[in-house]
């Protein structure tokens, strides 16, 4: 790995560590409650033998509602061991065999990944055909994205230092990799304010936002399914139908044969 790539990877590892700290603040805790409910609603419907979470943003078990018993969390946080992480690895180089995982969960992983395209290619590599990926992301076209614009010069503040990816862009990336979008859901329409009393007064925005302007949600969930690669059937080259009469056999004649006249004589 060259020094430039190492610097980028270490920077984004630090970003994930900072996000873990932010999730402990009031706004982060409120977001986590909503995201946990979202995951609890979708994970029981995704079946298989192996479930992999790429990126560990919180110490809580985000995968507890899944019916899949074998669950793994893979990440590296500043090179330090974290109890919630069961396997060390980077999102762009997962230490997992190809075509071996049934469900992959990316909880705000792409925003803090140096090469999100490669991270999604790794997801495509390790998923079995018909396997699912669940992505949680911050929406740049929202109050959250607007606040990020005001804070973009302060690159050490979380979660605003991440690169927010819009839902249409993530859909395009997945489509190029051969995924079908199963469902999308926006959540957290209120402005990102730390004050609990103000957040409670703005609770009505959640209902109005989900009904009238879902595209402006602060965050979103996307579920996609990997298509089964099928071989293109090749039509056989049919040979022309052979004549039932062989070339070596004499063809019948319409003339009255002379042998009949001879028999009569």
Image (tube, helix red, strand yellow):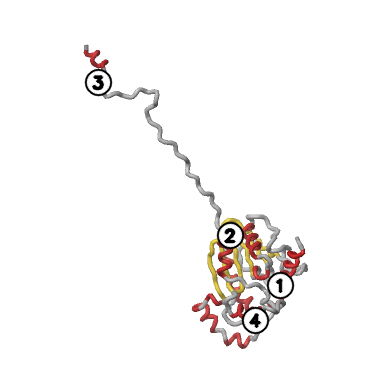
Which residue lies under the disc numbered 2?
A: 177
Q: Residue at x 56, y 59 (%)?
A: 178
Circle nearer the N terminus (2, 4): 4
Residue 65's spot in the image, x, y percent? Answer: 61, 68
Mark number displayed over residue 150: 4
Number of marks: 4
- SS state under label 2: helix
- Mark 4, Cα crowd under 10 Å, few <14 / some 14-19 / many 20+, is few
Classify the position of the N terminus by image quarter: bottom right
Q: Depth check: 179 or 100 in front? A: 179
Which residue lies under the disc numbered 1?
A: 15
Which residue lies under the disc numbered 3?
A: 256
In this rendering, the label closer to the viewer, 4 or 1? 4
Rendering quarter of residue 78: bottom right
Residue 254's spot in the image, x, y percent? Answer: 27, 24
Q: Are marks 2 and 3 in contact (CB under 8 Å)?
A: no
Give the spatial CA distance, label 2 vs label 3. 75 Å
Q: Is residue 128 above or below residue 11?
A: above
């Amino acid at each position: 790995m060259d020094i430039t790539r190492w610097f980028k990877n270490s920077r984004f590892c630090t970003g994930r560590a900072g996000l873990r700290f932010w999730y402990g603040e009031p706004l982060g805790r409120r977001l986590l409650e909503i995201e946990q409910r979202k995951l609890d609603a979708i994970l029981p419907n995704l079946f298989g033998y192996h479930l992999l979470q790429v990126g560990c943003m919180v110490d809580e078990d985000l995968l507890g509602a899944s019916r899949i018993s074998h669950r793994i969390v893979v990440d590296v946080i500043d090179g330090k061991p974290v109890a919630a992480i069961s396997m060390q690895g980077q999102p762009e180089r997962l230490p997992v065999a190809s075509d071996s995982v049934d469900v992959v969960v990316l909880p705000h992983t792409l925003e803090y990944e140096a090469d999100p395209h490669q991270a999604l290619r790794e997801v495509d590599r390790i998923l079995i055909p018909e396997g699912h990926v669940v992505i949680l992301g911050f929406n740049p076209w929202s109050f959250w994205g607007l606040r990020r614009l005001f804070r973009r010069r302060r690159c050490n503040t979380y979660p605003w230092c991440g690169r927010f990816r819009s839902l249409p862009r993530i859909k395009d990336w997945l489509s190029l990799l051969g995924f079908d979008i199963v469902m999308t859901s926006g959540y957290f329409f209120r402005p990102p304010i730390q004050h609990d009393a103000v957040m409670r007064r703005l609770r009505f925005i959640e209902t109005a936002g989900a009904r009238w302007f879902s595209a402006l949600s602060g965050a979103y969930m996307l579920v996609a399914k990997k298509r089964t690669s099928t071989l293109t059937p090749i039509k056989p080259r049919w040979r022309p139908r052979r004549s039932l009469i062989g070339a070596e056999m004499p063809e019948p004649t319409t003339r009255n044969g002379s042998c009949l006249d001879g028999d009569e004589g």
